[in-house]
Amino acid sequence: MLPRELLGNSVTPDGAPITLTREGVALVVRVAHVPLMSSRVHGSEDALAALGCAGLRARPGARVLVGGLGMGFTLRAALDALSPDAEVVVAELLATIVEWNRGPLGPLAGHPLDDPRARLVVGDVGGVLRSGRAAFDAILLDVDNGPEAFTVASNAWLYGREGLAKVHAALRPGGRVVVWSAIESAVFRQALRAAGFAVEVVPVRARGAVKKGSRHWLFVGRRSG
């Protein structure tokens, strides 16, 4: 086991401990001592943005919502896929994660929070979803471990009937939502269909171009129009 250097610690809204450690060349975030994200594994986060933002570079004033800042990789990939006049709203519930992204996590993805197209909301992504109808061309959700594997119980509502209805309403006609998940889920696939989306499920490698190791799953829901 690699030695762990503690870089930061706090607690989630549910009272669980959250830590940031350096382990060899990797930075790792754990919640309740369970690994939540690692700087060595972000291929599926990059793919999340690529799928969600496909075709949007040519759209003037495109708006994208990222739910979950993580280590900044999805935000960076979304910004790289969009035009100079785009806006990416990123909602992060944990102020600690934002603080770490402005500190030791910042260099990993090239300090995406400093990009003038990025607008940070420190709070539940649900508040952004409720703030306006037909507001976004794409919504990228990387909240917790996906629709069935939670480290923070309060995140569960987002992937249920109420949350998906808010997502559908917040998308512009023809927009898409892409949901990151640690596991496949036939139940969630059906929930997306019930919410009015055309659904595609895309398996991706956790390490991106490295064609081995674990897989993650991206649920793509397209709104008609």
Image (cartoon, grey):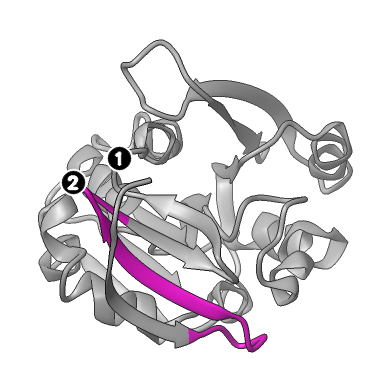
Asked if the residue at tag 1 contacts the one at tag 2, i.e. Cβ–Cβ closer than 8 Å, the answer is: yes
Determine whether the residue tagged by mark 1 lies in a helix, strand or loop: loop
Residue 36 position (above or below residue 178)? below
Q: CA distance from mark 2 to mark 1?
A: 8 Å
Provide the secondary structure element on which disc 2 rests. Answer: loop
* Residue at image point 35% right, 29% down: 55
Image quarter (top left, top right, bottom left or bottom right) of the C terminus: top right
Above or below, 179 against 87 in this view is: above
Residue 15 falls in image quadrant: bottom right
Tell me what residue is drawn at x 75 percent, y 72 percent. Answer: 153
84 or 124, which lies in front?
A: 124
Q: Give the residue drawn at x 37%, y 27%.
A: 207
Does the rendering let one see residue 225?
no
Tell me residue 168's x, y (percent): 69, 55
Query: Across the whole image, how many numbered discs are drawn on residues?
Result: 2
Residue drawn 46% across the image and 81% down it? 94
| Magenta span contains residue 206 | no
Crowdedness of circle 2 by 10 Å Cα count: few (<14), some, many (20+)?
Answer: few
Answer whether residue 16 is magenta in the image.
yes
**Could you tell me the amino acid type at mark 1?**
Arg
Q: Position of residue 23 (x, y in %)?
A: 27, 53
Q: Which residues are magenta?
A: 11-27
Q: Which mark is residue 25?
A: 2
Residue to which mark 1 is pinned: 40
Check disc 2 and give the amino acid type: Val
> In this image, 219 relative to 197: left or right?
left
Left or right: where does residue 73 sit relative to residue 152?
left
